[in-house]
Image: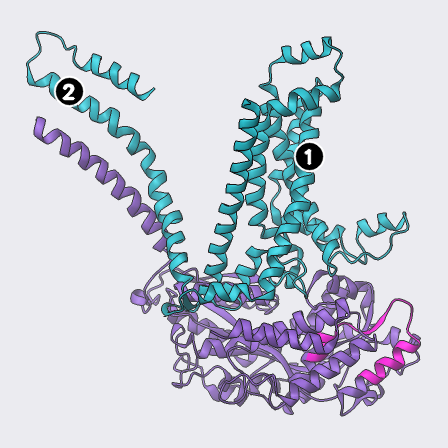
Chain colours: A cyan, B purple
Amino acid sequence: MATTIRAAAKDEGTAPVPSAPRPRPAWRSRLYRLDLKGSPYAFIAPFFICFAAFGLFPLLWTGWLSLHYVDLLKPDVMEWKGFDNYTRLWSNDQFWTALRNTFTIGVISTVPQLLMALGLAHLLNYRLRGRSFFRVAVLAPYATSIAAATLVFVQLFNPDYGMINWFLSMFGIHGTDWYADTWPSQIAISTIVTWRWTGYNALIYLAAMQAVPKDLYEAASLDGANRWQQFTRITIPSIRPTILFTIIVSTIGATQLFGEPMLFGGGVGVSGGSAHQFQTLSLYMYELGWPSRQLGRASAVAWTMLLILLLIGLVQYLFARRNRTKLGG
Amino acid sequence: MRTTSRPRRAAVLATAALATSALLLTACSSGTKSGSDSNSSAAGGEKITLTVGDFGTFGYKEAGLYDEYMAAHPNITIKYETTQDGQKYWDALTTHLASNSGLADIQAVEVGYIAQATNTLGDKFTDLSKVEGVNSGNWLPWKSKQATTAKGSLIGLGTDIGPMAICYRTDLFQQAGLPTDRAEVAKLWQGDWSKFVEAGKTYQAKAPAGTFFTDSASGLFNAALSAQAEQYSDASGKLVYKDSPGVKKAWDLAVSASQAKISAGLRQFQDPWNAAFANAKFATVVCPSWMTGIISKYSGDSGKGKWDVAAPPVASNWGGAFLTVPKAGKHQKEAAALAAWLTAPEQQAKVFTKVGNLPSTVGGLQQPAVQSAKQEYFNNAPTGQIFAAAAQSITPSPIGEQDGNVKTILTDNGILDIEEHGTDPAKAWANVVKLVDDKTGH
């Protein structure tokens, strides 16, 4: 692409009106070339300057901080610690609890969320009465603020007066403590995450599904494939890259989960419950950095999270590549 | 032409880049104002806006004090910002102090964190002792001492203190066969917190279904600990909670209450706790003067006249706060004047009659409006007398820098863990020690 444009530009630049003075076309062509070459950089510069100032610099600075002891109240006084902050994590129970919680909450929120989104998108892809209404409706939870949504769910999950326990009691399940017990509290938090993001993912899937050629379905139905078969044999393989994209985005989101458990836990949100039963890595980082004022150790957790994400990304990349070669073969 | 064109274009690009980054840089530093113009006076009728940041219920708005002050000072507009959760408020405030940005002209500081403010953060606040109308002798002596730095500057003006009583529901007491008259009720536990737990067992034996004697073991822990001469830190500020007999006593008491199942096992100041007031789920709550405002708010009309106030087993103080003026503020002089006015005896008395925060000044405690105060909501209990009497016999204990953190870990990850999960107390204690070591060490 780039070469053809440049070639075209050259043609235009070197074809001046014959009567024009000699230096001018050269100057104009230079200007033109500079414009062509330089302007794109100027246009993308704001992003990269922003990224350098608010992305790259904090990232590197956090890495530097993670090798020191730094008091939040005196951030200019730094005491060299080497990799102590990292080795301390290794032997810290609370870190492992947080890591495990992040993983379990991530799995029980991401998996049902994406499956439900796929199903919803498939339904929305049919000819429906009031289709636009449903499409806007599925996005509504996403537009709700975390704080507002979480506060409502906290009420619903209240062990004493909440609607969910009242509903479950009709089926003989009594007194589930959605705040204090490990699995119930994690399920409750996953519910909030799932509720907020299902519609969002469904719309992404829907967009991908609409790009699937209609004649594929027509051919399939002529061959006698029912809707389920069409879904599994045509839709899913066709939108595979989109599915991979949503998996990556959801994994990143799940690893950084913060707002929901924080607000769900109320006053004990920062420590993720009295026994850290739903403390995620982000919350652990916040607890170290703010209430405990240990910026260095919090930075070490931040970097550990980054490394974990890179690792997950690598695994997903390898999976994707293997899938691709399999398809190619 | 040819030679200039390139640099010019480059210059345009460079300028654009510089402008963008300059914009970004100013955007992130705009909050950082040095104290250079801090002494600018608004005497010439210049209109200024003062901001006040606090947590919970300070009662200034409720008592109409902001309006009163603005009426007397037409050039001043007061804006305020309140956070419900004191811990979250403090976390945000420390971040703002460390970066000298985003600060209000007046910031409230809770007593549990006052040692951090006077030590590590001492040079972030202005010295208020020289402000007109401020004399550190106006306050109860220990109150002013808590807000004085090692160098002798007074960085906080005491707002209120929290002498404790016990608030109890007469209707539940009656159904459980306990006395309801406040003098007789006080006799149930006079002199010893462990008698309070015993009374709880008596209550629980005949308790109305679904109710508990008290709201939380953590509340009991706070109350019992507050009466100790030494709490988490010794006089030099060193953490001694591990070996402190006071902490052990309060811990054992809280554990015994939890194990006797006389506590509803709630965490204070959270929604379920708020809701439990409306549903009459517990019969007593340890009740510093400021708690009366919370009780009447959450119990609402259904609890009116059913609550009463009795003397505590042992007198002690729980809570109370200070108003500080950060040096990063633009109008330090005016802010100091406002803080001094808000914490003067007359204003403290007005706040007390409105929301129940007991004056921390000697003059405020002696105000007739305080001494004769009766609260209709609490069955006309003479709250002024009860709390002022408790205030006289308070023996304050030293406060260390980490007290706030240690308290949070002890109550939220220790006692609450026992209450919620039935964790073995010895294991919970070991866990607390591990967490405190982890969070407070280098």
Give above or below for A75 relative to A309: below
**For the N terminus of chain A, which image quadrant?**
top left
- In the rendered view, would you say B348 is above or below A262? below
Placement of A123 over or under B366, stated as above or below = above
- Relative to A73, B243 lies left or right: right
Where in the figure is residue A85, as x and y percent of width and height? 46, 65
Q: Residue at left 60%, top 64%?
A: A94
**On what subunit does the disc labeled 2 rest?**
A
Quadrant of the rendered image containing residue A161: bottom right
**Which residue type does callout 2 highlight?**
Arg
Dot placed on the residue nearer the N-terminal end, 2 or 1: 2
Please report the residue visible at 59 percent of the width from the left and 24 percent of the height from the top: A207
Mark 1 Cα shell of 10 Å, populated few (<14), some (14-19), many (≥20): some
Along the horizontal axis of the image, is B199 left or right of A205?
A: right
Instruction: Please identify, in this view, whether the residue under mark 2 or under mark 1 is nearer the observer.
Output: 1
Residue under numbered circle 2:
A28
Residue B321 visible in the displayed image: no
What amino acid is found at the position of numbered circle 1 in the picture? Leu
Q: Looking at the image, which is closer to me, B299 or B354? A: B299
Can you say which quadrant of the picture contains the C terminus of chain A?
Answer: top right
Question: Which of the numbered marks, if any, corresponds to residue A115?
Answer: 1
What's drawn in magenta, residue-wise?
Answer: B197-221
Q: Are marks 2 and 1 in contact (CB under 8 Å)?
A: no
In the image, residue A152 sits, relative to residue B131, either above or below, namely above
